[in-house]
Amino acid sequence: MIGFGMGAGLYDAAFSTLGRIFGASARRAITHLTLFGGFASTVCWPLSALAVEHIGWRGACFAYAAVQALVMAPTLFLLLPREARKAPSALDRAGAGTTTSRERRTFWLLAVILMANGAVQTTVSVHLLTILQAQGMQLVAAVAVGALIGPSQVGARVIEMLVGDRLDPTATLAWAGALVAVGVLLLALGAGPAAVAVVLYAAGNGVWSIARGTVPLALFGAERYAVVIGRLAAPNLMVQAAAPFAAGLVIAQVGTETTMAALATVAATNLVATIILVWRS
C-alpha cells in the first residue's frame, strides 16, 4: 500500500502536474519543488525519531497517516487547479508521447540516460556506508560524510535556481552528469578526501533531479509532457528498484573496488550519452 502511494507521489507525478499547470514555464516551479523536497529527510528523519521516542512507532505511523489524510490530501484536492475536460486527442489516445522517428530516438536516448543515472544514484545511496568503510573509514566518519549529501543537493539546487534560466535544460543535465561522474570516479579511485567526492556526486544528483523534470518539457513540449514523463518514469523506477539489490550481490562476490569501478564506468559512459543528447537537441 505504501509503495503504491509512493509511486503516485514521487517527483515524476509532481512534475507532470506542474507541466500541465504551468506549461512551458514550469521550469522555475520544478526547481522550487525540488529545492524544498531536498529538506524532506533533513526534517522528517529527526522528527520521526522524536515521535518514535515519545509516542512509539505505531503512534508515529498514525500521526503521519493523519497528516496525509487530513492535511495533504485535502490541500491537493482544494488548491490544485482543475483542468477543463476535453475530448482526447489522437496523441492522448495513442499515449505514445513521441511522433517522429527523431523524437523516438531522442526519447529512448533520454530513457537510457535516466536509467543509468538512476542505477548509479540508488546504488551509491544504499551502499555508501559500506563503500566508505571498505576504504578504511570508521562508521562514525562514514555517517558524517554521508550526511553531506542532503546539504550538497540543496546547495546545488539553490545555485541552479539562481543561474539555471541562463542554461538550456539539456546543458543543465550534462553539467549534472559531469558532477556525478567526477564524484563517483573520485570515490572509486579513493583519490583525495571522500567528502569531496560525495559533495560533487550529491551536487550533481541535486541538479539532476531538476533537469530530469525540465528536459522532457523542453524536448517534447507541454502538451505531451505528462505522457512522456510517465513513460520515462516506469523503466527508471524499475532500474532503481533492482540496482541496489544487484549491487549488493556484486559487492558480496567481487568486493567494493570492482563494484565502484563498474559504477564509475556507467557514470562516465552516461556523461558521454548526455553530451550526445545535448548535441542532438
Image (tube, helix red, strand yellow):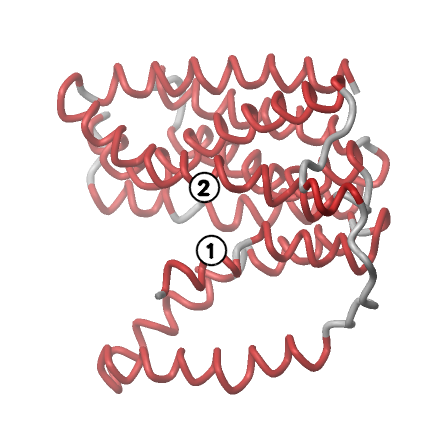
User: Residue 38, relative to residue 174: is it above or below?
Assistant: below
Tell me which corner region of the image, top left, top right, bottom left or bottom right, holds residue 91: top right
**Residue appearing at x 43%, y 13% in the figure:** 265
Tell me which corner region of the image, top left, top right, bottom left or bottom right, holds residue 99: top right
**Residue appearing at x 63%, y 39% in the figure:** 207
The residue indicated by pointer 2 is 237
Tell me which corner region of the image, top left, top right, bottom left or bottom right, holds residue 80: bottom right
Residue in the foreground of this view, choosing between 174 and 22: 22
The residue indicated by pointer 1 is 7
User: Residue 257, relative to residue 116: is it above or below?
Assistant: above
Residue 235 in the figure: left or right of residue 261: right
Residue 184 in the figure: left or right of residue 131: right
Residue 168: % across, % down: 81, 31
Residue 185: % across, % down: 43, 18
Pointer 2 local density, CA inside 10 Å: few below 14, some 14–19, many at least 20: some
Kindly identify which numbered label has been placed on residue 251: none
At mark 2, the secondary structure is helix
